[in-house]
Amino acid sequence: MYLRYTLKTAFSGLRRNTGRSLLTILGIVIGITAIMIVLSVGEGAESLILNQVSALGAQTVIVEPGRQPSGPADFAEIFTDSLKQREREALENPANVRGVDFVVPEVIAVAALSNESETTRVNVIGTAPDIQEILAISANEGTFITEDDVRQAASSVVLGATVKEDLFGSAPALGKKIKIKGRTFRVVGLIDPTGQVGFLNVDEIAIIPYTTAQRYLLGIDHFNVLWLHAESGEAVSRVVRDVELTLRELHDIDDPEKDDFHVVTQEDAIESIGIITTVLTALLTSVAAISLVVGGVGIMNIMLVSVSERTREIGLRKAVGARNEDIMAQFLIEAVMLTGIGGIVGIVLGALFSFIAALILAQVVGTDWEFIFSITAAVAGLLVASTIGLVFGIYPARQAAQKSPIEALRFE
């Protein structure tokens, strides 16, 4: 009965100044809304990236030149020439690396492709036929590049769906000729619309034999990546160990800290992505939480004003028997109700704006961006908002409770 009366009194006090109450909770609403948006978009981004990485398959092992990047300065090492044909042959040898189905080399060049007056600039991937197994792609028209193309460094090219559309529109492209860096290539195949696989948008690439890319486009004799396909998911850890031992022996490396290569598995990529997205989300959330502190200070100020305006009411309640604890409870409940309402409004607005953001990002990114509403984040947001009301409401509530009833009744 007592709690019901206290809640009723607190609600009456808030309703008495509806406009001021709404402005008071604005900081809380903005803070909770921002946090909900950050968490939803962050989880959506993590889900999207993890799904793309998972698309490479659990049996894929990636070997890249240079040591594992641990900072911005290390990224230059990925352009070193530590992976060449002898490394590929050593990794293909079952005596060195057990449980590998095949090794696929890859070099990457950004180049302009042209067909008469139409030009587009895309990633040109120089690779081997087995890349189809790694990326789970196929040519829906024509053929993919062949081992003969690789041996002869043939001027054959397979186009992604978007590249074909940019260069030929609705006209047939199979068998037609295009130019890449001034060299004429014949379109031998067209890839089915595929979208994102790993960090690569297959629709926006052109694939040629790696020997052609090395000789005519880049003028290099090394690879940017070696893709290994393990015979099973259970064999991946053994493959990674054998790859590291083989390459260290081949490069006369005794100290693993001096490796001029690094090996990445799907599990490693997922773990790294999880750490990065968690740190970024926590950082952005902490920035958004500043507005909650600002909102809490605003609530404390307004509650102090409310205590001053209701001095006579406090004196009257004390005169008819209200204890200090009763007065303090009333004002604390008012503060918690304010922030609680602000938290609920913030959660609703955060969910709405997150849904809109997911729709926009899906259009911008061109993928199925998932809208994620975190129940845990919503409950945590409501608890945080209520806690802020409790913490910042204590001082005004104490000020109200400590007023002398005689002085309060004399207040004009």
Image: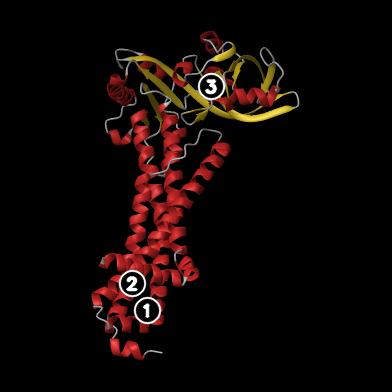
Q: Amino acid at mark 2?
A: Phe
Q: Nearer the viewer, mark 3 or mark 1?
A: 1
Q: Residue at x 31, y 24 (%)?
A: 240
Q: How many marks?
A: 3
Q: Amino acid at mark 3?
A: Gly
Mark 2 is surrounded, within 10 Å at the Cα level, by few (under 14), some (14 to 19) or many (20 or more) other residues, namely many
* Mark found first going from the N terminus, 1 or 2: 1
Quadrant the N terminus occupies? bottom left
Q: Of 169 and 27, which appears nearest the observer? A: 27
x and y, in percent, of residue 411 in the image: 37, 89
- Residue underneath mark 2: 331
* Mark found first going from the N terminus, 2 or 3: 3
Q: Are marks 2 and 3 in contact (CB under 8 Å)?
A: no
Q: Amino acid at mark 1?
A: Val
Image height check: is 341 above or below 183? below
Q: Secondary structure at mark 2?
A: helix
x and y, in percent, of residue 35 in the image: 42, 53
x and y, in percent, of residue 85 in the image: 44, 19
Q: Are marks 1 and 2 in contact (CB under 8 Å)?
A: yes
- Residue underneath mark 3: 126
Q: Of 233 and 304, which appears nearest the observer? A: 304
- Residue underneath mark 1: 307
x and y, in percent, of residue 102 in the image: 40, 14
| Residue at the extreme right of the image, as rendered | 117
Q: Of 234 and 51, which appears nearest the observer? A: 51
